[in-house]
Amino acid sequence: MYIKIDFQSEEAIYIQLRNQIILGIATSNIQEGDTLPSVRQLAEDIGINMHTVNKAYSVLKQEGFVTIDRRRGAIVSLDVDKMRAIEEMKRNLQVILAEGRCRNISCQEVHQLVDEIFSEYE
């Protein structure tokens, strides 16, 4: 598993790690049923604190992307509650689209961007 963390970013490292794992799942680089590296191993590989990895894994568990098994660790296990996912996506998109509107980004440009990004996950 390839994880890229930007240590100069203002975005928290655990959020970057969470996002990288979600992108890995979306692009099929990480499959449902795959076991993620142990907290200790991933922290060592990336050069970050174990608590940071643990926090990212906890967030992924809360969001329904992984389950935690005492023996096997974090396992990719997607929550299929589509309506909840759509509502959460809507809340996130409202702010992003409002920012785009303030910057004069057209609806057509947004649709083109969404199509471009979504095609990366097929």
Image: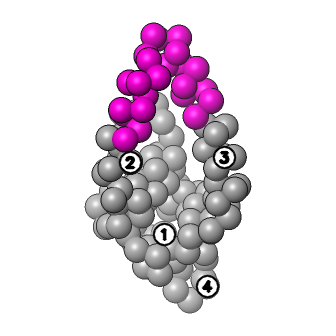
Indicate the secondary structure of the residue bearing disc 4.
loop
- Residue drawn where x is 64% and y is 54% of the image: 85
Q: Is residue 119 visible?
A: yes
Mark 2 to mark 1 CA distance (whole Å): 30 Å
| Residue corresponding to mark 1 | 39
Indicate the secondary structure of the residue bearing disc 1.
helix
Res 95 → quadrant: top right
| Residue corresponding to mark 4 | 70
11 vs 118, left or right, is right
Disc nearer the start of the sequence (3/2): 3
Q: Position of residue 98 (x, y in %)?
A: 58, 20
Res 63 → quadrant: bottom right
| Residue corresponding to mark 2 | 118
Please name the amino acid that badge 2 sits on.
Phe
Q: Are marks 4 and 1 in contact (CB under 8 Å)?
A: no
Please name the amino acid that badge 1 sits on.
Val
Disc nearer the start of the sequence (1/3): 1
Mark 3 to mark 4 CA distance (whole Å): 29 Å
Circle nearer the viewer, 2 or 1: 2
| Residue corresponding to mark 3 | 88
| Prevailing secondary structure class for the magenta stretch in the rendered image | helix
